[in-house]
Amino acid sequence: GEVLHLRDEDRNAVWTPAPGPLGLSRTHRIHHGWGRSVLETRSDGLEERVSWGLHPTLPAKIVGVRLRNTGSVTRRISATYFADWVLGSHVSKTVGRLQVRFDRALSAVVARNPYLPKFSKATAFLAADRGPDGMATDRDEFLGPNEPLDAVPEGLLRPAPGEREVPRRQGCGALKVNLTLGPGESGEVRFYLGVVGEGAELERALAGLRERAESDPAEE
């Protein structure tokens, strides 16, 4: 599964823009189009807009997050995207077999399953349009031992989502990006989730995704 969490860094409040798993009691507007969905909601002086779409040529999903501060005080909000890697038919068959790590050079969490022919030469990745302010690769470290996805992750109850660049047991991917919004200001970040080949192909894919983000601001 995948979850996008928002956190008020000053109030230590954690929620999800979507109705689940930690959605607030408020109105959500959802629009669906060809290959793209947009969610809009607002509460507590913050307008939230999340879009999901596919890159036109690269094998990647793009999740865009735009926040606007409609209040009178500066807000420090972080966006954290979590991916629960499977890379196989079922998580029970891949626990302990995935090779997951945070690649500092690429500022991305990458995952491989060398034990399954279908995925042995593929690399899954989670990245953002900039270097993250925090990351996690260990599922237990981020979610907490035996914690379900509908609970507040332990990694969001502290400043850093995780510390291990390689998981001890079951891997995951989580990237955190901080946004500081003055009164009336907007901020945005894009997350990328995809799968490509190895080595140079991964580098080219991430470069292409980030280059597009710089030249193509998030759509209104």
Image (cartoon, rainbow, N blue to C red):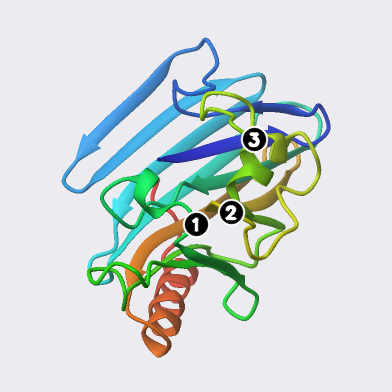
Indicate the amino acid at tag 3: Pro
Q: Position of residue 181 (x, y in %)?
A: 72, 43
C-beta proximity under 8 Å, tags 1 and 2: yes
Q: Looking at the picture, does residue 155 appear above or below residue 104?
A: above
Q: Name the residue at 19% across, 40% down.
A: 33
* Mark number, residue 145: 3
The answer to whether 59 appears left or right of 165 in the picture is left
Indicate the amino acid at tag 2: Arg
Q: Looking at the picture, does residue 158 appear above or below residue 126?
A: above
C-beta proximity under 8 Å, tags 1 and 3: no
Indicate the amino acid at tag 1: Gly
Q: CA distance from mark 3 to mark 2?
A: 11 Å
Q: Position of residue 44 (x, y in %)?
A: 66, 19
Q: Which residue is mark 1?
A: 96
Q: Earlier in the sequence, mark 1 or mark 3?
A: 1
The answer to whether 35 appears left or right of 122 in the picture is left
The answer to whether 215 appears left or right of 129 in the picture is left
Q: Residue furthest bottom?
A: 200
Q: Name the residue at 25% across, 45% down.
A: 36
Q: Earlier in the sequence, mark 1 or mark 2?
A: 1
Q: Position of residue 204 (x, y in %)?
A: 40, 84
Q: Which residue is mark 2?
A: 169
